[in-house]
Image (cartoon, rainbow, N blue to C red):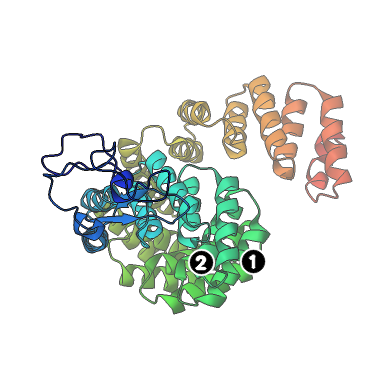
């Protein structure tokens, strides 16, 4: 550090030499010797008057003291901006504080860098976030918040392996942080480790039973491994942690429906609507649950509510059409199906439903056209191929019928009805050996349908 007092004729004189420059004999330097201030200079001021502080004796260097109060003020303002979600303003304050402390002496620097990384993450400025978190870790390797923040960024970047590594380091430093275990669970789930994810969520919940997102994700993980009871228990735990969270009721309704607990499913969907009327997709799910229960009148009301909320209109109209079709109200069914196509022209299932309705009223040529349109959009529908085969057979187009029933039976080999129809189509074109092969398939499966066609193959 160099200093030149006012009026000094030798501006290169260093402070060290001016303070002390003994001669060869150990005495004071002679007047006018190099490194000695001239006679007409003022008396040297003390070091503390200059605002300088010496480093340790080993370094022999000097540096300016930091303004701890001003730096702290910037950091405090940054935290206030975080609380008000003003990320850019928060970044500006943290950077201003850090610029005043280039050597990072302030005790709050690691936390300030961590908060800086958090703000960049919120703004999806992931490179800057990673850099800030890594600087915080370089200053304090035990800064668990920086490791945890790094884990969150890596998850945002879909890099779960790195996220899990950072999260596990945070957990070693501070094992009692529920959020850290929650983030590790998310990383494990993203890597396909559902069992590990469940264990991490359980650790998080044991530390904070109110962490309802951990309950929710644990429910999803349990469902993924087929543990429906565990999934239901998890969503029920989420509701206990956050009674007003509509999505937990929504998920419960779906699971109850899979267990054919229709009353419970309906009640869960109704609670979801009660908790959050803006959760519009619940209306379509409620309508489906009511349909499964057989309450068509209330199901139509729910589907109309979905249409009014402008959510899944195509699905709502399709289901209204299916209800009319099941009651043999052909015109009403067709009108509803056409409304569904107005909202979603490429909805393959609606085209198939129109084809089915045409086959019911004997309009087979129109049925074929609708079914083929549906299969062009979604080729893997065995029911559509089965209906197509029926329409071709009734029009005497037996080779086309064979082809359609063959595809249906290949897509759904466990459905004996397709093999039965294929057998009959083979007989219609004189392919007895192929028909016998289908009969053997039915007999090997001990299907009761086999007895229906024996007399057709071997007429008395």
- Relative to 135, say whether 346 is above or below: above
Task: State the residue at coordinates (87%, 25%).
Answer: 433
Q: Which residue is mark 2?
A: 214
Image quarter where the C terminus lies is: top right
Task: State the residue at coordinates (59%, 53%).
Answer: 164
Locate residue 137 relative to residue 381 in the image: left or right: left
Numbered tag placed on residue 199 in the rendering: 1
Q: Residues within 10 Å of mark 2 (few under 14, many from 20)?
A: many
- Relative to 398, say whether 454 is above or below: below
x%, y% of residue 280? 32, 57
- Relative to 339, say whether 168 is above or below: below
Q: Quadrant of residue 394?
A: top right
Task: State the residue at coordinates (89%, 44%).
Answer: 444
Numbered tag placed on residue 330 in the rendering: none
x%, y% of residue 302? 34, 61
Q: Residues within 10 Å of mark 1 (few under 14, many from 20)?
A: some
């Amino acid at each position: 550090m160099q200093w030149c007092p006012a009026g000094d004729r030798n501006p290169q004189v260093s402070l060290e030499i001016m303070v002390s420059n003994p001669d060869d004999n150990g005495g004071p330097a002679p007047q006018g010797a190099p490194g000695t201030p001239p006679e007409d200079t003022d008396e040297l001021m003390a070091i503390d008057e200059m605002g300088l502080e010496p480093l340790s004796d080993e370094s022999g260097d000097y540096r300016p003291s930091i303004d701890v109060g001003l730096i702290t003020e910037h950091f405090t303002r940054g935290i206030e901006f975080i609380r008000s979600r003003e990320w850019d303003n928060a970044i500006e304050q943290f950077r201003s504080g850090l610029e005043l402390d280039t050597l990072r002496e302030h005790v709050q620097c690691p936390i300030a860098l961590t908060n800086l990384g958090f703000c960049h993450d919120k703004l999806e400025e992931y490179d800057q976030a990673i850099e800030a978190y890594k600087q915080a870790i370089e200053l304090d390797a035990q800064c668990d918040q920086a490791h945890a923040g790094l884990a969150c960024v890596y998850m945002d970047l879909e890099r779960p392996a790195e996220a899990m590594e950072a999260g596990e380091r945070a957990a070693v430093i501070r094992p009692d942080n529920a959020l850290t275990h929650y983030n590790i669970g998310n990383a494990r789930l993203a890597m396909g480790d559902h069992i590990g994810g469940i264990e991490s969520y359980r650790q998080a919940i044991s530390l904070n039973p109110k962490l309802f997102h951990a309950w929710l994700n644990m429910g999803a993980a349990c469902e993924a491994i087929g543990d429906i009871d565990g999934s239901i228990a998890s969503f029920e735990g989420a509701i206990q942690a956050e009674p007003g969270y509509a999505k937990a009721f929504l998920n419960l309704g779906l699971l109850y429906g899979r267990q054919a607990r229709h009353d419970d499913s309906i009640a869960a969907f109704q609670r979801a609507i009660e908790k959050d009327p803006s959760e519009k997709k619940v209306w379509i799910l409620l309508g489906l649950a009511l349909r499964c229960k057989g309450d068509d009148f209330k199901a139509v009301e729910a589907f109309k509510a979905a249409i009014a909320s402008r959510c899944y209109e195509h699905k709502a109209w399709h289901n209204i059409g299916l209800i009319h079709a099941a009651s043999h109200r052909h015109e009403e069914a067709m009108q509803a199906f056409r409304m569904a196509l107005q909202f979603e022209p490429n909805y393959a299932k609606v085209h198939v439903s129109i084809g089915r309705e045409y086959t019911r009223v004997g309009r087979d040529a129109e049925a074929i056209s609708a079914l083929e349109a549906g299969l062009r959009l979604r080729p893997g529908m065995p029911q559509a191929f089965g209906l197509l085969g029926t329409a071709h057979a009734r029009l005497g187009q037996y080779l086309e019928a064979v082809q359609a029933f063959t595809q249906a039976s290949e897509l759904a080999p466990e459905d004996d009805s397709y093999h039965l129809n294929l057998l009959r189509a083979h007989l219609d074109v004189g392919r007895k050996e192929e028909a016998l092969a289908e009969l053997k398939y039915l007999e090997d499966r001990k299907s009761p349908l086999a007895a229906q066609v024996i007399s057709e193959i071997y007429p008395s």
